[in-house]
Amino acid sequence: MSPKNRDANRSGSGQNGKNAQGPGKQPAPSLALAASPSSANGLVVTLTAVASDARTPTLSSSEQQAVDDLFSTMKQTLTTLGNTFDALGKQTVTVASISPRVAAARELQRTGEQLRERQRRQEARVEELKKALSTNVKDQQELLNKKADELVAEFVGKEVPSRVEKELTALISIDIKQQLTDYKRRILEVKVNLHNSEARRKNALLLGLSPGTEPLTPLLPPLAADKMKLPEHPALFPKTVGSLFQLNTVQLSALLKEYRIEECTEVEAASPLSPSVATREENLNRLMSFIGVGLFIPPLSATTENSPSGLKSPVVTRRHAWPSL
């Protein structure tokens, strides 16, 4: 109920009370209860005094007091209802204005839960990545350490000898260097001599095998002037005694030069062989004498190197002692 309606009801009620308490000269107006809609609280209840031309009976004082009490109680009830409707209207407006806020708060709460869930998943993913990266880092570290050790070893293997040589060059005099080189060369020469002596001993003991199948032990050629390592035996060196007798003049000449044996170029005129065959037989005897084979080929028949029997020595006799080298 609006304040204006309440004031109107109060004034009407008071006037009625005065008329009721009068000497009864005028008739008491009749009362009517009306309800009308209101924009504030939806419903307004008004108490309206309606004048009646009909005459009403005169009321006693006690009856008039009861009527006044009834009106007073009704006024209080209507006032309470009006206040209640006003409060309900305000609460309706408040609830209508708060509803979007509540929806926004719920949306914010749901969004916050989603963010917290996503954060938990991200943290779990980060922990997995940390573990994977930790394992990968350890593997890469071991691999890099191994690679670094290899690089250091390779660098040291290249740099240390050269630096040591430079330092020795700066500290050691030229005479000492030459002496050192001579000592190294002598040691190599001793090794070559030992090898050749053992090879000659084995070649001198070739007995009991079928003629021509006896294996020969190759000898090493002398050291070259510009090399400081053990030489290898010549590729033309015969593997058996039979292949030794099959060497031609060119092969014999190459072997004699590699072993630094003086090559025979002329033979005495009294020889019954042709000059080329006699030269070959002489060079073959010199090579056999050098490698320790205890055989000797005497020139008895006159043949030529180009004939079918030119590379076959006619007579082979065993020496009873090693020839002089």
Image (tube, rainbow, N blue to C red):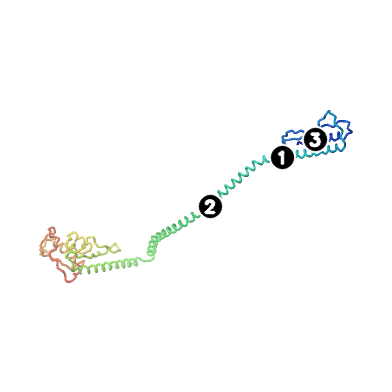
Q: Position of residue 71 (x, y in %)?
A: 81, 37
Q: Is residue 325 visible?
A: no
Give the residue number, with chain letter if any, for mark 1: 88
222 or 105: which is nearer to us? 105
Q: Which mark is residue 304?
A: none
**Dot 1 amino acid type:** Leu
The Cα–Cα distance between marks 2 and 1, rounded to whole angstroms, is 52 Å
Pointer 3: what residue? 9
Closer to the eye: label 2 or 1: 1
Q: Secondary structure at mark 2?
A: helix
Q: Is residue 304 above or below residue 317?
A: above
Label 1 sits on a secondary structure element that is helix
Measured as percent of width and height from the top left, residue 1 is found at 75, 36
Q: In the image, what residue type sits under mark 3?
A: Asn
- Mark 2 lies on residue: 124
The amino acid marked with disc number 2 is Ala
